[in-house]
Image (cartoon, rainbow, N blue to C red):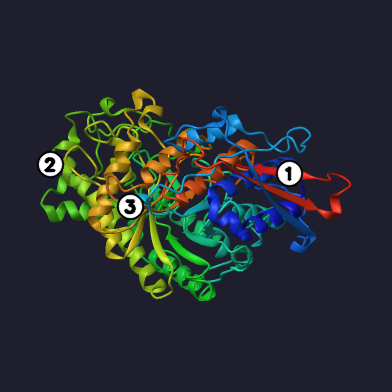
Amino acid sequence: MTPQILFSIQTSLYKTPFLHSHIHHLQILHFLSKFYTKLMALTLRSSTSFLYLKDIKTLKTLDDFSTTLCFAQIKPSCTTRFKAKNSIQDHVQSTRETSVSPFEGEYNNGQKEKFHALSSGHHQTGNNNSRVPVYVMLPLDTVTISGHLNKPKALNASLMALKTAGMEGVMVDVWWGLVEKDGPLKYNWEGYVELVNMVQKHGLKLQAVMSFHQCGGNVGDSCSIPLPPWVLEEISRNPDLVYTDRSGRRNPEYISLGCDAVPVLRGRTPIQVYADYMRSFQQRFKNYLGDVIVEIQVGLGPCGELRYPSYPESNGTWRFPGIGEFQCYDKYMRASLEAVADENGTKDWGKSGPHDSGQYNQFPEDTGFFRREGTWDTDYGRFFMEWYSGKLLEHGDRILGSAESIFRGTGAKLSGKVAGIHWHYKTRSHAAELTAGYYNTRHSDGYLPIARMLAKHSVVFNFTCMEMRDGEQPEHANCSPEGLVRQVKLAVRDAGIELAGENALERYDGGAYGQVMATSRSDSGNGLCAFTFLRLNKRLFEAENWRQFVSFVRSMSEGGRVRLPESDASTTDLYVRFVDHKMKRLKEDKEITLV
């Protein structure tokens, strides 16, 4: 089956009135995905980032194809009846067990692939069944160091497949290290212009991430994109521009928030540099904002997240589930701590960070600060954590205040990302969250202040680990991603803002999809306004992964509550026949049956 035939079949299906009135869109996409997965499997090539697909020629016109609809009164056999399923995994498994792919072996008139039409009887009530648009993160190296699209033909084919699957759009990192690499205020947006035009051509939407951090050294980083060379020169002259831990280890991933208001970047403050970058983006893409570019995710720290780089994986510094370390030892952070302690009348508290907070890979009970009755729950511990977390909130407030003024009136939403630090969540101190800057303990809600800060600027709260379940985590790590998500949803609800989600790790299984659909509903706080899937690569297009993903996307578009009926209420089978006149000699009569 060629791409021309596949996409013409898709167009014909959607233009057929009978199909619109009798077959649910998920059923059509499920059928199409089975063709597409085999097609993609035949064209996959090795690549570090993208699919390498053969060039797809111009599609044939619909005049080259004909569609025949036939009906047969066949009473459904009891062996083909399905019980109602309560999750997408069960639906996927049932379909797999009772269907035959048209690509498996010779397909003849006697072999008809049968699907039970989805029930139209489920009702949508309230926010629990609201549609959740799904986006896909593009590869980290979508734009090359030279400023051009990486493997544009493969990207074009991938976007075509995503559109076919019912995707809302894609997300891309707009790297500071690529765009402003030639010098201060010298911006090169051309690679991203190519991308936006390609996305628009396919009728997709774009989430653009203002990525002010380096790429490399974190979970899932498959390439290296450092900060702009001229910024690295300033860091080499003044190493205190980056975060520093107690042992003096420097982290060049992101500029320390301690110097937010200091003109350390050739006469400009970091906040001014970020604002100038966003302003240039707004001017270059003003004709796309609100139409094609529907969201600006503002980078707020390492990995684009509002946090300190407390658990760096580079060079094996940190390993899961270590508690991490406080990042407050550059001269700017030390000066701030000293000033606040002096003002508070506790000058000795400003000499340094906690001396008993342990090392990156220790557990809470191994330390004096984080153990059950530790220093975290003393006057000093509360003073330090209020300062440490407060500096993070101020940082987010400054950047988002600039972003709000720059993108106001463009029609594009603003979002900010918060890390899903779920390990040691069940302990009293929540040590891993504290070192990252989230003052979330048994006695303190660390996410409500963040949500309120985001609400001040009408910013969407973007959160990770939506796919994780408590039962999947190792017991010794005291994880509770589900409890963490529930807490965040309540904080977002109380702050009156929207919540969007991402998966933290690359997952393609039904269990992960089912968990995302469960958290997308509003049973315990806000539901999701959007979900972004990590990430576009060749594994996504493997046959089984693609099939499950297409089902997940369609289910999210239906509110995450798609079920199969127990049996077919009618006795009508829909029989769809496609004939490509130019391939009659190869396959005279290719028939596909949808029941």
Given contact means CB atoms under 8 Å apart, are the residues at marks 2 and 3 in contact?
Answer: no
Q: Amino acid at mark 1?
A: Glu
Q: Note whether residue 267 is visible.
A: yes
Give how far across and how far down residue 207 sits, in percent.
49, 60
Give how far across and how far down residue 156 sits, in percent.
67, 57
Q: Residues within 10 Å of mark 1 (few under 14, many from 20)?
A: many
Q: Nearer the viewer, residue 487 or 567?
A: 567
Residue plotted at (75% across, 41% down): 42
Q: Quadrant of the C terminus?
A: top right
Label 1, label 2: how far apart the Cα atoms are = 75 Å
Q: Nearer the viewer, residue 510 or 72?
A: 72
Q: Amino acid at mark 2?
A: Asp
Label 2, label 3: how far apart the Cα atoms are = 48 Å
Give how far across and how far down residue 432 sits, in percent.
32, 37
Residue assigned mark 3:
125
Q: Residues within 10 Å of mark 3 (few under 14, many from 20)?
A: few
Residue plotted at (57% across, 51% down): 140
Residue assigned mark 2:
379
Q: Residues within 10 Å of mark 2 (few under 14, many from 20)?
A: few
Label 1, label 3: how far apart the Cα atoms are = 39 Å
Quadrant hosting residue 411: bottom left
514 lies above or below 448: above
Q: Amino acid at mark 3?
A: Thr
Q: Earlier in the sequence, mark 2 or mark 3?
A: 3
6 lies above or below 429: below
Quadrant hosting residue 416: bottom left
- Total numbered labels: 3
**Residue 591: which numbered mark, if any?**
1
